[in-house]
Amino acid sequence: MLCVIQWSYTNSISKMRFMRKTIIQRTIIITILLLTGICCFSQTNNLITIGIQDSIYSKLLNQNRQLLIYTPESMRTEPATRYPVIYLLDGEMYFHTFTGVVKQLQGSFIPEMIVVGIVNIDRNLDYTPTTDTTSGLKPNGGGDKFTGFLEKELFEFIEKKYPAAPYRMLVGHSLGGLFTANALLKHTPLFNSYLILDPALLWDNSKLVNEEASLLSQQKFKDKSAFLALANTLPEGMTIETAIKDSSVAGNGIRTVIKFNDILNKAELESFRSHFKYYENENHSSVVLLGSYDGLKFVFSFYKRPSFAVITDKSASILETHFKNVSKKMGFTILPPASIIGGLAWRCTLDKNFDNAFSFLEMYLRLYPSSPYPYYQMGQFYEARGDLKKAAEYYEKGSLYIPNTKKD
């Protein structure tokens, strides 16, 4: 579809000459070309992709690490935009699930984001923060070295190669959840937010939980956030209430996670947001989907954009103000997504609500001055109003921002 729109820009000048003769014929021709472009696309590309494969050689780990990368669709059309980055542990297992949740929520509930799925080589080694000689999971205890790989190698690699904003989230499940909880307590500055999904906190006789209170006093948690998901791993007939009260081995995992959350809450950390949720109807594996969904919505609860069921003369300023507040929360500038601005402007134009359409288009041009799309849409706006001269001017301006476009 992008190539079709770019065709429209590239031919803007000739289109306007033709439009002066007959607007009806021009519209018919463009419609036919649009349909042709869509058909050609479907015939030449039958693949559905959700990401790309990449890799990095780690000197610290002395191994090549495979990466699965998801990038927002707007990255193709808005190259100046920067995106928060989610580092997803167990990438080969959860990349498909997690990126599906991100795509479903982005734009309305969460910002568009890059997802970096880190493929495992030896998760027992990489995700365990301490060495436990009594565990059957060997080798183990390489968590600090893996953290160094993230901090000293992977972050730099991603931030040089992809349009990454200065905001990072870490997501981990089970042993990955243990690693994520350890990062929160011991390496707090590395990430802005953490999704800890049914963590294996029993590791090394619950050493991390036993040290938690002391660790919390050593770090600064200002403006950090964490979501903790707990699955129902109890035997049939046991409830979470009975598990908390008794001392049976079957309830150890759940009691340890609840203890971790209680200590976190009692610390009353400044400007730190956390939320705990028990999923009674989910097991250790299935909790990943709902935990990711709820966790993302919690972390970015401030992001949800206002409803514009009814558009008024204040709607454009409300939208822009909302994203200024979002930017303060995120720690960097996040513009209202171009797709939202353009969609609202188009809706107003169709409804012949021209004053409100113009207020959105003015913002669109101001915020995305190097993109051809707002110029093209402003041209459509003036065309709808019957001002063909103005429409031609904006079509021509838009054509200047298309790569490799030559003027007549």
Image (tube, rainbow, N blue to C red):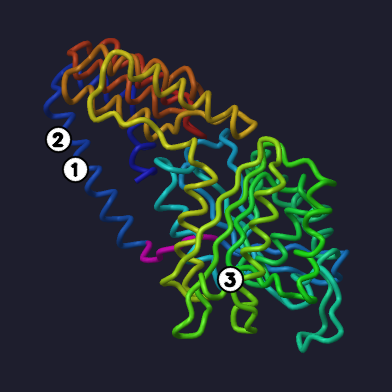
Assign a secondary structure to mark 1: helix
- Contact between marks 1 and 2 (CB within 8 A): the answer is yes
Q: Circle 3 sits on which residue?
A: 244
Callout in the foreground (3, 1): 3
Is residue 229 shown left or right of residue 388?
Answer: right
Q: Which residue type carries mark 3?
A: Ile
Q: Circle 2 sits on which residue?
A: 28
Label 3 Cα crowd, 10 Å radius (few <14 / some 14-19 / many 20+)? some
* Spot occupied by residue 306 in the image (x, y as percentages of width and height): 36, 30
Closer-to-camera residue (34/215): 215
* Spot occupied by residue 70 in the image (x, y as percentages of width and height): 54, 56
Instruction: Say which quarter of the image contains residue 3.
Output: top left
Q: What secondary structure is the magenta-colored segment mainly?
A: loop
Q: Which residue type carries mark 1?
A: Ile
Callout in the foreground (2, 3): 3
Is residue 375 shown left or right of residue 228?
Answer: left
132 in relation to 10, above or below: below
CA gap between label 1 and label 2 equals: 6 Å
- Report the residue at 39% width, 29% height from top: 373
Closer-to-camera residue (389/168): 168
Label 1 Cα crowd, 10 Å radius (few <14 / some 14-19 / many 20+)? few
Which region shows up in magenta?
Answer: 45-51
- Contact between marks 2 and 3 (CB within 8 A): the answer is no
* Spot occupied by residue 115 in the image (x, y as percentages of width and height): 58, 55
Q: Circle 1 sits on which residue?
A: 32
Residue furthest front as drawn: 245
Q: Which residue type carries mark 2?
A: Ile
Q: In which quarter of the image is the C terminus?
A: top left
Q: Is residue 315 magenta?
A: no
Tell which circle, 2 or 3, labels the residue nearer the N-terminal end.
2
